[in-house]
Image: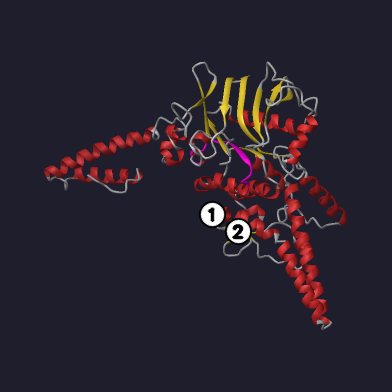
Amino acid sequence: MKISKINIPHFQQFKDFELDLTYPAGHSKAGHPLDKVCLIGQSGTGKTTILNQLYQVLMHFFYGTQAELYTVKPPQKFNFSIEANFENLRSVEVFIANKEILIYDPNDDFEVDLPSFFTALIEEGYYDKHHTKLVNFPAETIDSINNILQKQTVENPLRNIRTSDNMKEKIIAEREKLATKTIYNFATDNPLELWKSILLDLQEYEDARNYYSRQISEALLENDDMPIENLRQQFRQWKNENPNPLEALGNLLNPVLNQFQLEVNTRAEYKFSEEVKFIQVNTLSGNNVPYDKWSTGTKQVILTATPLFKLNMRNTVVLMDEPERSLYPDLQRMAIDYYSKVASGAQFFYATHSPLIAASFDPWEIVELYFNEEGQVERKLYYTGKNHVDNYTPHPKYLRWDEILQQLFGLDAESYDSSNQNLVKASALKAQLKKHMDEGTMQTPDAQEALEEFEQLSQQLAWQVMNI
């Protein structure tokens, strides 16, 4: 499922507001829903409001009852609607009207049996019970997750999940429930479910590996070559069919963690499964870094990417508010491409204030919101004439960072006022020194004082070459 259109006739600061979220003419995917959308704009223009409304309508669409989820025709009055596309299967419109969620199918002129509608979606894999359909990362995600983890013991935030058979049974039940979870909302759901599920995968992997090790050791003690070869063959087959979960997680996280000079310890070997307590992070030189020593940026990467690794993200809508939080600029540059690679089958909606995040998008993927003269929110169009890839300007990926701030974020000034004042002062000193050079008076006290002040200003203004 992907969203191709949003319509807000009248809600808060929005009036007669429509968003076309499809690729423009001239694109290889022209007319299809965008794979990712970036919402930017001044505070108060409604970026988070759009994400929240998307969450509400999708949540009720996936969880609603037949009575709530069908109408013969579109309602006359509604607060918010989306057009949802199911690839080549069909598209429907979903409305929030009077706090109810209603579906309209423009392909049918009469009321359709809703179970048949969902049966068709199930056959196409959209309603597979092992398919996560909606993931929500609110802006406070990292803070809330960190608060939960910090309440655990510092040495072992999740404790040892093998403390008892009852605990293991409980976690297995949680994992089975997680596998069929339709919606994952980090504003309300406990992220420890995901961590425990991964740790249980690790423990089961270690249990199976240790089982083969014991069997081979016993066969060696008995000097029986034939069972050993059979066991080795079984072990090799098992390893081929069951890759180490640590290696898969490391392949996901390490490209970004390496930027922090860190990596997931995929080489760890546990003699007993009881030793599997928490996913280990090491420095590139091999030293372990405990959770309480992780930087906020490290937590941001691990705690947002891991759900995309663990959950089934096919045809999933992902809402992410302020993905730049706690990330240094070099990581902001790679964040969007990274998330898209981790969950290539998902549709992402981002709301951001970061020019570096915005620079990761093509112009047709950016929704810049602004207030018009009537105080209503509109979308600033980046194209003239027909909606075609060749008509878009500016192109965020082609701009310098300062140009993005000016062109996309509406920042008129190039720097602080103090910078402009010093530039004027430096220009005046440059002219003064030029005059001294022309007159051959560079050795006078006035000239030397001006030169010293000019050199100091040059360093503060980061001028690489002093050209007088």
Query: What range of the chain is rendered magenta?
Result: 343-356
Residue at (31, 37) in percent of width and height: 423
- Vertical side of 315 occupied by 175: above or below: below
Q: Quarter of the image containing the N terminus?
A: top right
Q: Which residue is mark 1?
A: 259
Nearer to us in this view, 262 or 58: 58
Residue 239 picture quarter? bottom right
- C-alpha distance separating marks 1 and 2: 9 Å
Vertical comparison of 264 with 226: above or below: above
Q: Residue at x 58, y 35 (%)?
A: 32
For the question of whether residue 221 can be seen, the reply is: yes
How far from the left and from the top, in percent, is residue 354? Answer: 51, 38
Residue 22, given in percent of the width and then of the height, sits at 56, 33
Q: Secondary structure at mark 2?
A: strand
Does 239 sit left or right of 378 as displayed?
A: right
Query: Colour mode?
Result: secondary structure
The C terminus lies in which quarter of the figure?
top left
Residue 65 sits above or below residue 123 on the image: above
378 versus 197 height, above or below: above
Residue 376 shown left or right of residue 178 in the figure: left
Q: Amino acid at mark 1?
A: Gln
| Residue 26 relative to residue 161: left or right | left
Query: What mark, if any, has residue 263 been given in the picture?
Result: 2
